[in-house]
Image: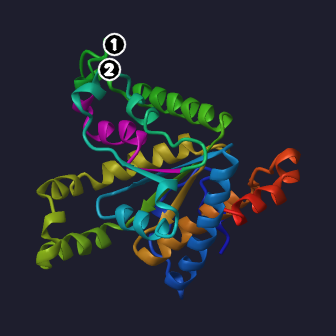
């Protein structure tokens, strides 16, 4: 599987991209990838030069939560930090739209996962522009101010933000889980039909589903304007969950392998004293 096939490296049309691919033995192959990712993360932590930010976006029911669970299952729990961004709090609204994401960034040596991301600020707020009023932006006085120029300017700020991260040692990888409308319907019905899944259902999901076409339009614009060589987007077919998880894991592994992480070496002084240290411990 060539992961470059999923990278947004030229202008794309979402309507022409597949939402379903099925890889045989995806679950079995994912286990192999997980082990390698875990080993690389251990070395990355020891080296302490790089951090990794994984950004996950997708329509409701696209499988973000289960993907996080399955892809990072074997990574040291201390090596992964997951942040799920909900409606901004009162404190967060008193800062600029990127602030709450900046303070959640992973430190060097760790993998950070954003379940929904800073892109919500040019997706959800573009579909529901009235949400922006809660940010109390001096230049935004009415809905007419929330035009394409406003959102494209925000996308420019996001590109600058991600460039800053890359220049300071954070590897940024972004995944859009490309779900079909039919498959979303099936997953919503499953939540309603299986009692133990009922808690996952929200009537709001149906309201947002009616805005499907608007969301697709906004996603397409975001993918085309913010996929860069330093922070690329990958459009992952999401109708088959095991295959989607495998693709994300493979992209992550191949990206991390490029950095050739190395564990730090001991100083010559410590090396010269190893036998002495062993003797001290053996003679206790």
Seen from the viewer's position, the closer of residues 253 and 149 is: 253
**Which residue is under mark 2?**
145
Residue 21: image location, x then y, percent: 50, 77
- Determine the residue positioned at 60% across, 35% down: 165
**Which residue is under mark 1?**
139
Disc 2 to disc 1: CB gap under 8 Å: yes
- Determine the residue positioned at 84% across, 52% down: 273
Disc ID at residue 93 = none
Q: Which of label 2 and label 1 is nearer to you?
A: 1
Real-space Cα separation, disc 2 to disc 1, in angstroms: 8 Å
Q: Label 1: few (<14), some or many (≥20) within 10 Å?
A: few
Q: Does 65 sit above or below residue 197? A: above
- Which residues lie in the magenta part? 111-132
Q: Label 2: few (<14), some or many (≥20) within 10 Å?
A: few
Q: Is residue 9 visible?
A: no
- Determine the residue positioned at 40% across, 67% down: 69
């Amino acid at each position: 599987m060539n992961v470059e096939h999923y990278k947004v490296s030229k202008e794309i049309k979402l309507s022409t991209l597949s939402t379903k691919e099925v890889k045989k033995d995806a679950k079995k192959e994912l286990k192999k990838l997980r082990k390698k990712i875990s080993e690389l993360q251990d070395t990355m932590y020891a080296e302490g030069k790089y951090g990794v930010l994984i950004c996950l976006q997708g329509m409701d029911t696209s499988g973000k939560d289960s993907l996080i669970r399955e892809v990072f299952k074997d990574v040291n729990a201390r090596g992964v930090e997951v942040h799920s961004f909900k409606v901004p709090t009162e404190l967060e609204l008193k800062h600029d739209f990127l602030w709450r994401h900046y303070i959640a960034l992973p430190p060097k040596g760790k993998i950070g996962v954003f379940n929904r991301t800073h892109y919500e600020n040019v997706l959800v707020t573009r579909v529901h522009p009235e949400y922006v009023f809660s940010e109390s932006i001096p230049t935004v006085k009415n809905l007419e101010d929330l035009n394409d120029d406003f959102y494209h300017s925000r996308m420019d700020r996001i590109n600058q933000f991600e460039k800053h991260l890359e220049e300071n040692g954070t590897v940024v990888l972004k995944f859009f889980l490309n779900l079909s409308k039919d498959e979303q319907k099936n997953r919503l019905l499953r939540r309603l039909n299986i009692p133990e899944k009922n808690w996952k259902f929200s009537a709001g999901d149906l309201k947002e589903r009616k805005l499907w076409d608007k969301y697709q339009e906004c996603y397409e614009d975001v993918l085309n304007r913010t996929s860069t060589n330093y922070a690329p987007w990958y459009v992952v077919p999401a109708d088959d969950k095991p295959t989607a998880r495998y693709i994300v894991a493979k992209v992550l592994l191949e990206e991390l392998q490029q950095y050739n992480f190395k564990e730090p070496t001991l100083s010559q002084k410590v090396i010269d004293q190893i036998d002495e240290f062993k003797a001290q411990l053996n003679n206790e």
